[in-house]
Amino acid sequence: METVMERLQLQKNQRPAYTKYELSNLVKNKRRHEIMTKEQFAIKYNVNLSLLNEIEQAECAFNVPMYRACSEILQKPIAELTAIITDNMDKVDFRASDISDGVKQTLETANLIFDEILMQLKIGAR
C-alpha cells in the first residue's frame, strides 16, 4: 500500500511546510481574529470572494492564485508557503560508535511512521 509520503513523491525525511488544510485554517483564524465577514476580509486583502471561499473550504488542490492570496493575507512569501522541510539526519545522536544495518533499518521505519503520523495530523485525519 502506498504511504502519504510516497503519494506526495517526497524523499525520506521531507514534508511540506504547510498543507492546504493548514493554510486554510490560518486564513480562517486570521479572518476571525480580525472579526470580519468574508466579504469584508476579501475586500481588505483584495481577494475575490469565491477564491476566499475556496481557500477556506480547502476542498481542491491549491493553485497559483490561491497561494498568492494566502501569501497576501498571511504576509508570507509564496516560497515559504510551498517550501519542503527536510530533516537533517546528520544531527541525530545515535549514542553508539557502531551503527548496525538493523539499527539503521529500525530508524528508517520509525521515521516513516513518524512521517505518516505527522501527515495524517496535518491533513486532519482522526
Image: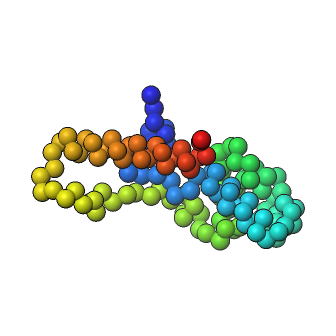
Along the viewing direction, whichever of 111 and 59 lies nearer the viewer: 111
Single out the residue that lies furthest toward the left: 98
Residue 54, how many percent across, how many down?
75, 50
Number of numbered markers: 0
Residue at the image position 15 percent from the left and 56 percent from the top: 96
Single out the residue that lies furthest toward the top: 1
- Relative side of 42 to 30, left or right: right
Along the viewing direction, whichever of 14 and 96 lies nearer the viewer: 96
Residue at the image position 67 percent from the left and 68 percent from the top: 74
Quick check: can you spot residue 51?
no
Image quarter (top left, top right, bottom left or bottom right) of the N terminus: top left
- Relative side of 22 to 100, left or right: right
Image quarter (top left, top right, bottom left or bottom right) of the C terminus: top right
The image shows residue 76, relative to residue 55, as above or below, that is below
Residue at the image position 70 percent from the left and 48 percent from the top: 58
Residue 112, how many percent across, how many down?
38, 43
Residue 27, image quadrant = bottom right
Residue at the image position 86 percent from the left and 63 percent from the top: 37
The image shows residue 26, relative to residue 60, as above or below, that is below
